[in-house]
């Protein structure tokens, strides 16, 4: 496949807070990789979980991207608009007898370190009405099978699915799981290249398995080391990493390029986002990205 003509990538933030410097590294790398291959770069808001969301961040994230010159192609997509799409995929999986309703509580799974390993399901008979009347999640049973893939940065990756257990695709509270939404949306948008943080690398084998169940082609993956602060803590919305300061967008971009160990633009180009991005697209070197699992500054 020639990546040049067909590349479709995306940035897919969860609006639990505004973007911070760590999110900028992921956004910038996926933008540069897409543009370096003359590809398409899409934006998808992963607003699946209203109780965890910050409404203001949902509005603010696109503005933060634009303030850094990171303009996406077409309209931003929002997962909250895709319920019908997810439901129809779930119906297809249920019709293929690939899912089972599960009423197990977290507490019941503690002795398997939180994993669900066939505890309650049987495909010998369809779910009873009683089972379906009790609040239940829908799970995809996993196999004793290793899913491996070659990551652009981290090389050979993968693990046996038994290490993660049967996957929830729709939660007991009726919300769709990230694993389902990401696989279905990437497929519907024709995404063939996923560039995202290392924290999601371990999710990839179970996503590949779901793609197999649905007959979807897998994308190519590039996971990125996570940005840490001076104390060695990962920057995250949970640990209150500061929002990007929009008055220093050029500096933020240069810092993100340095974190990714990319060639730095000459000083005279460093005062305009547009000039920095244009230069960085041309000089994009994925092979320079550090493979540190401890994080990058
Ligand atoms: N929504 C996820 C996040 O903000 C990214 C999902 C993905 O790229 O697959 O971390």
Image (cartoon, rainbow, N blue to C red):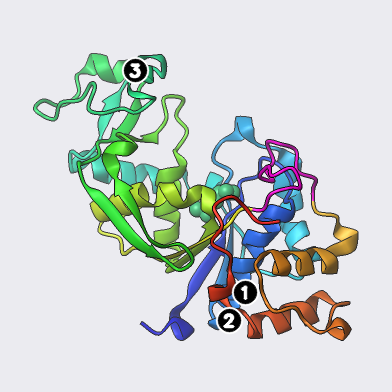
Q: Secondary structure at mark 2?
A: helix
C-alpha span from label 3 to label 2: 48 Å
- Quadrant housing the N terminus: bottom left
Q: Say left or right for 239 vs 212.
A: right
Residue linked to disc 2: 36
Please say if 138 is above or below 11. above
Instruction: Find the magenta span and give its range.
Output: 227-243
Label 2 C-beta lies within 8 Å of the nearest ligand 1 atom? no
* Mark number displayed over residue 32: 1
* Mark number displayed over residue 111: 3
Q: Nearer the viewer, residue 51 or 34?
A: 34
Mark 3 or mark 2, earlier in chain: 2
Q: Say left or right for 60 vs 248.
A: left
Q: Position of residue 262 (x, y in %)?
A: 66, 74
Mark 3, mark 1: which one is toward the viewer?
3
Please say if 153 is above or below 230. below
């Amino acid at each position: 496949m020639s990546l040049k003509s067909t590349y479709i990538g995306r940035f897919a933030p969860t609006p639990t807070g505004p973007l911070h410097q760590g999110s900028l590294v992921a956004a910038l790398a996926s933008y540069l990789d897409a543009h370096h291959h003359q590809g398409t770069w899409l934006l998808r808001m992963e607003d699946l979980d209203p109780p965890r969301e910050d409404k203001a961040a949902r509005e603010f994230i696109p503005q933060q991207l634009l303030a850094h010159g990171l303009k996406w192609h077409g309209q931003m997509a929002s997962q909250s608009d895709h319920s019908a799409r997810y439901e129809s995929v779930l119906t297809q999986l249920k019709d293929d007898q690939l899912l089972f309703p599960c009423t197990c509580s977290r507490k019941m799974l503690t002795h398997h370190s939180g994993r669900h390993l066939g505890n309650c399901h049987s495909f010998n008979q369809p779910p009873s009405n009683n089972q379906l009347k009790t609040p239940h999640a829908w799970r995809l049973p996993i196999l004793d099978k290793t899913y491996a893939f070659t990551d652009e940065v981290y090389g050979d990756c993968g693990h046996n699915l038994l290490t993660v257990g049967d996957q929830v695709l729709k939660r007991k509270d009726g919300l769709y799981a990230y694993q389902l939404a990401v696989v279905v949306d990437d497929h519907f948008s024709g995404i063939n290249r996923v560039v995202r943080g290392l924290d999601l690398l371990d999710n990839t084998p179970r996503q590949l398995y779901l793609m197999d169940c649905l007959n979807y082609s897998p994308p190519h993956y590039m996971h990125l080391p996570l940005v840490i602060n001076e104390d060695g803590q990962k920057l995250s919305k949970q640990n209150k990493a500061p929002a990007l300061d929009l008055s220093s967008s050029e500096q933020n971009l240069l810092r993100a390029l340095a974190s990714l160990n990319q060639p730095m633009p000459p000083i005279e180009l460093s005062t305009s986002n547009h000039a920095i991005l244009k230069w960085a697209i041309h000089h994009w070197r994925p092979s320079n990205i550090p493979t540190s699992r401890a994080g990058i500054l």
